[in-house]
Every structure is written in structure tokens, then in C-alpha cells.
Image (cartoon, coloured by chain):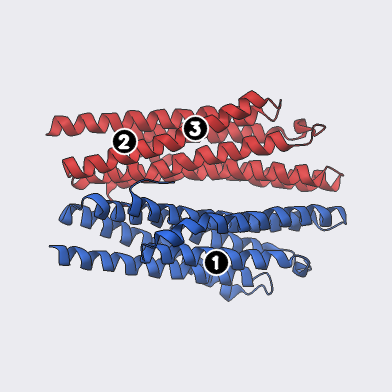
Chain colours: A red, B blue
Amino acid sequence: MRKRFDDELRHLNDLVLEMASLNESAIKKAISLLDEKNKNIAEDVIHDEERTDQYEKTIQNQCLKIFVEQQPAASDLRRVSSALKMITDLERIGDNARDIAEICMGLPDDCDTTSLPLIKEMAEATVNLLNRSIDSFVNLDLELAKKIDDEDDVVDNYFLMIRDQLIDIIKADFDPGAAIDFIMIAKYLERISDHGVNIADWVIFTVEGSRT
Amino acid sequence: MRKRFDDELRHLNDLVLEMASLNESAIKKAISLLDEKNKNIAEDVIHDEERTDQYEKTIQNQCLKIFVEQQPAASDLRRVSSALKMITDLERIGDNARDIAEICMGLPDDCDTTSLPLIKEMAEATVNLLNRSIDSFVNLDLELAKKIDDEDDVVDNYFLMIRDQLIDIIKADFDPGAAIDFIMIAKYLERISDHGVNIADWVIFTVEGSRT
């Protein structure tokens, strides 16, 4: 019974990892659209988001199957419940990447995206945080999970810096529509990072039995 | 056993309802800060958010308790799993209300909030959508749950109208920092409405066994 449970759990982990890899690739592709509006890449991001939705359903069914067939208790129950919860975060990250791609594709053609190098740095910090939160889940690494909140402060700080920079460039006659688009992209990155924090919180819950 | 399960389920529903009522009141209080920056009301919203966090933990424990003690199957399992998922939405609505309150309190004192009557209309539509999604959960009302997506289109449309209005007033020399704050408030309302749609999706999943 235990071996069967471990196999089911391994399968669950693999699925979560695949879903998270899709997310990582979607965020990177979405942000690359700031440099070049490429219709194929934008369609790729949309396709990734649809696959993420499918993964959510598959993983959810896998969790319910484990609940019914294995009736896990204590930390096993928390582990499966956490997976069930965290896929909501992963699914929404897919939505956020798609939102970013759609905003990038709608930017005016003459929009100068080079004036905002911070957005790319913020995207990098976000992807990094997300990878580490997923690592903490896969390895049930409590120490790593507890560091994610501090990394989120870095991402939040990028948001504030970008916001201030945008206010300055609006005053210097930058297209206010494009400025609002940029702040939305930064907001979506901030949201993605928040989802990473949630994932780490679920890891803490799984190991310690209570959430932060 | 069934009676016990029904009692547990009723208790679960009551808790979800209480948590949702807190949300409704927090959103209304947060938006009222646009009219008057009232420190006590802002603190109330923060307190509501903290209580929402507590509710999330209590309801989560109640769900895990039902999983272990009652080992529900089929639609009962879906119902408890849905409650477990939807409290994440309710918890985030609390966060969003708090975010709105914090933005309102940070607006410049001379900021003219009357130039954006649409934000209040949007807030009303959002609270309405949320109430109806919670009603659909409590009564397992599939017909109502299926209407929520259309109501979300109305809220999304408000966001676009507010965005356009803000671009216009920035061009007419409105403080760009305050404009970005307003668009963030509208974004948070849009997010709250998305959480309402998620709740309705969980109702559809509970009744039909698959998500939209």
C-alpha cells in the first residue's frame, strides 16, 4: 500500500513539475515580446496557458484519486491537499503570462520598450523565485521554502521602482496608454511572484502542519 | 454517518458564508475610503483581512477533518474539495480589499476622486457578482453559477472604460501617480471579480464533475 502511495505521489510530483516548467517557459516567452512582437511566440504562450489548464484538471483528478483510493492521513494528507491547492497558483501563473503576452502584442508599434530595462530584471527575479518555490515543493525543502518570502520583497521592490520610473516618464511626455500597459506587466509579474510565495507556504504547511 | 456528514457540511457552508460576508464588507469599506480617508475604517479593513486569513485556516482544517473522518466520495468529495479550493479565492479577495484600502489611504490629499465615478459603479458590480457566486455555492445553484461568467464581462468592461478615462485625464494633466493608483484599484476589483468566477466554476465542478 505504501509503495503504491509513493508511486502515486511521485507521479503527482512529476505532473506538478511539468506544469511549472510550462509556466517558466511561458513567462520568458511573454517577456521576450517586449523586444519583438512575434505572433508565433504569442500564440505559443496562449497554447501553453491552455495546456496549463489541462494539467490543472489532470492533477486535480490525480489528487482526488489518491484521496479516495489511499485515504492518506497526517503529512501525506497535507502533501496531497497542498498539491491540490498549489495547482491553482500554477494555473493562474499561466493566465498571468498570457495576460503579459496580450499586453505586449497590443503595445503601439513605435513604443520605446528600452526605456524600461527594470521590467526584464523583474521578470528574471520572478522566474528565479518561482523555480526555487517549485524546488522547495519537489524536495520538501523547508529551509528553502522559508526564504521565498524575502525574495518576494525583492520583486515587490522592483514594482515600486518601475511605478516611480513610469510616473517620471509620463511627466516627460511618454504615451500614458503604454505607461499603463507597462505598469500592468509589472503588476502581473508581482502576482506571479505572490503565487510563488503561496507555493512555498504550502510546502511549509506540508512539513510543519500549519501555514505561515 | 450521513447525518453526521450533512452536519459537517452545514458547518462548512456556514463558515464559508461568514468568510464571504467579511469580504463583502471589506470591499465596501475599502472603496468608501475614496470619498473620505478614514484611518479607523482603513484599520477595520486590515483587521477584516486578518480575520479572513484565520477563516481560511479554520475552513481548511474542517475540510481535512471531513476527508479523514468521513472519507467522502463522488459529489461529496467534489463539494469538500471545492470548498478547500474556493477559500483561496476568498482569502485573496481579503488581500485585494486591503490593497485597495492601502492605495486609497496613500492618495494625495488634494486628489480629485470625483472625476472617476466609474470606479464606484465597478465596485458595486463586483460586490454583486461576488454575492451571486457565493449564493450559487450555498444553494448549489448550477443555473446561477453559469451566469457569473457573463457578469464578469461587465466588470472587465468597466476596467477598460476606466483605463481609457485615465489615459484621457493624464493627457489633461491629472497627477500620473494618482492615475496609476486608480488603475490599480480598478485592477484589484477586476481580480476580485475573477475570484468570484472561480467560485462559480467550483460550483459547476461540484455539480457536474468537470470544470468549465
Residue beneath label 2, please? A140
At x 33% / y 70%, what residue is drawn? Answer: B14
Subunit bearing disc 1 = B
Q: CA distance from mark 1 to mark 3?
A: 31 Å
Tell me which amino acid carries mark 2.
Answer: Leu
Q: Quadrant of residue A102?
A: top right
At x 28% / y 41%, what residue is drawn? Answer: A63
Tell me which amino acid carries mark 3.
Answer: Asn
Residue beneath label 3, please? A23
At x 71% / y 32%, what residue is drawn? Answer: A117
Q: For mark 2, give the secondary structure.
A: loop
Q: Nearer the viewer, mark 3 or mark 2?
A: 3
Q: CA distance from mark 2 to mark 1?
A: 39 Å
Near-viewer residue (B174 or A43): A43
Residue beneath label 1, please? B127
Q: Is residue B23 visible?
A: yes
Q: Quadrant of residue B176?
A: bottom right
Subunit bearing disc 3 = A
Q: Residue furthest front?
A: B143
Quarter holding the N terminus of chain A is top left
Residue B133 in picture, x, y percent from top left = 46, 62
Residue A95 in picture, x, y percent from top left = 53, 40
Q: Earlier in the sequence, mark 3 or mark 2?
A: 3
Q: For mark 3, give the secondary structure.
A: helix
